[in-house]
Image (cartoon, rainbow, N blue to C red):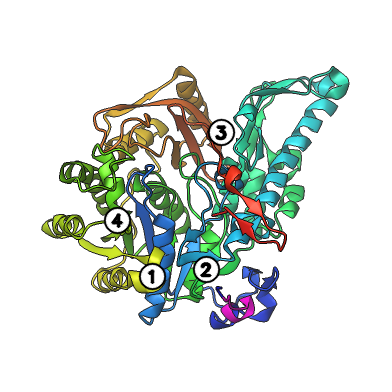
Amino acid sequence: MLQLRPITEIAYALRIPESALEPYGHHKAKIDTSKLNDKTLSGKLVLVTAITPNKAGIGKTVNTIGLSMALNRLGKKAIAVLREPSLGPCFGMKGGAAGGGASQVEPAVDINLHFNGDFHAITSAHNMLAALLDNHLYQNRHIGRWKEVYWKRVLDVNDRSLRHMLSGLGGTAHGVPAETGFDITPASEIMALLCLADGAEDLLHRINRIILGKDQNGNMVSVGELGFGPAIAILLKDAIKPNLAQTSEGTPAIIHGGPFANIAHGCNSLQATRLALQLGEIAVTEAGFGSDLGGEKFFDIKCRIGGLKPAAAVLVCSLQALKLHGGATEITMKEINAMALEQGMLNLERHLANLSAFGVPVVVAINRFPWDTEPELQWVQEWCAARKVQVAVTECFARGGAGSESLGQLVLETMARTEITAPNWVYQPEDSLEQKVSSIVRRVYGGAGAAFSEAAKKKIKELEQAGYGHLPVCIAKTQYSFSADPKVGTAAAGFTLPVREVVLNAGAGFVVCIAGDIMRMPGLPKVPQALNMRLDEDGTVHGVG
């Protein structure tokens, strides 16, 4: 049985003072960053991202954790910096998000379930804001109804029945009738702004910037104007603090925030990343899904807002995922298939080109599965070598940090010979919102451009006239394709991205552009992961993760 180190020992090794540590039991804690004296960002930042995900499994989180452990084995003070799991996918199709095998963060069950209460606090803060707004509308009926209300409610579940609904029914005594719906908590603007806030003061500032809707005169109304901000900030007073845990080998792990990359910006909190750069020599972080989603948003949103300069990027792939992209099926993807593997490399090639365009050196990690063959592994390595791409085979799921030492060595060598500079951006702040979206489609997705619905065009015009045109854009689309069609995998090209809706996240500081059929409230699969879970009499949890 794995023996975890007391969290106080993990904190001591990082020189976190006792006054800044707030333990949640024996193996978890929060860190009050305001009580840390040295805020110098002396560490180097490594991004771990992946090819386009599919049902074969790729192993991005496993390799993020494995790389952090490998770097420690190689004598470096490395820290894993991860997002918090959502209960929606955990009980749905994807399962937990704490890694797996010999490469996971611990205590894994606690991290996957209610981890230190952050998601619940964010859900409560978001819905309290909805309640305060509804009460404001109810109490001021005599003044006149608002022209439009933007703010929905959220829950951290996958529940398609909540996507569209009516509220306030039953007459005027029961509220103001309205057409509304629920998003999942990782899509909440509260989640996004918490992950981009620079401490408690900036958190309140961002909350006050949230736009809730338009009044009867067509003027945008903010949280600050209605005086709701301080109460919402109080609900987040603990959630704003990053969480400290450990990997299966005792490597420190800072886990904080969890926006999805297909409907939000897909990165852990800026505070957590900066904290890891303060406390360690190397911070190993991840961005959700493929480099076209979490990766692009990591650079164009998180790094731009936070002034971060990544030293290297790791692109994770697996043979079976590549073969599935190349035409193999879920039944045949484990079999030797040179044609499917070669065709699937088009996806890897596109992601390599995208990451290289950001001006960050890239290392490829082939996540080895037990059934992978040496000839196919060798073929992928030779393919990379022919293109002067550094590559390593990893076995961290089975062997932990030892299974990623070759990757760790390559990352160290790459960072040693590379000058760290700010990333190359896909677009500039002065570009119009439509230009920003089109630049991402052409330069990152490989498409011809974007087509905006009339509603999207109207919203963009409104936002630009209101002074929000300088904000970054966050495209919400399927994670299974470069296009908006999840059935078009591998390396879709020449398509037009259909943008159906545009949402202002003024508090977070970006504009969400919703493309295709992507939903901000997912549904459960035919056989949810929840059906495979059980709790023993001694409290042992099975099936989570």
The total of numbered circles placed on residues is: 4
Q: Could you say which disc has been placed on residue 371 in the image?
A: 4
Dot 2 or dot 4: first in sequence order is 2
Q: Secondary structure at mark 1?
A: helix
Q: Write down the region rendered in magenta.
A: 3-10
Q: Which residue is mark 2?
A: 253
Specify the amino acid type for callout 1. Answer: Arg
| 115 relative position to 137: left or right | left
CA gap, disc 4 to disc 3?
A: 32 Å
Is residue 249 within the magenta segment?
no
Disc 1 to disc 4, C-alpha distance: 16 Å
Q: Which residue is mark 3?
A: 523
Q: Earlier in the sequence, mark 2 or mark 3?
A: 2
Q: Position of residue 448 (x, y in %)?
A: 26, 29
Whether label 2 touches label 3, CB < 8 Å: no
Looking at the image, which residue is at 33% across and 49% down? 425
Q: What is the distance, in whole Å, between disc 1 and disc 3 at their CAs?
A: 35 Å
Using the image, tell me which numbered label, if any, was put on residue 399.
1
The image position of residue 205, as x and y in percent, is 64, 51
Residue at disc 4, secondary structure: loop
Distance CA(mark 2)–CA(mark 4): 30 Å
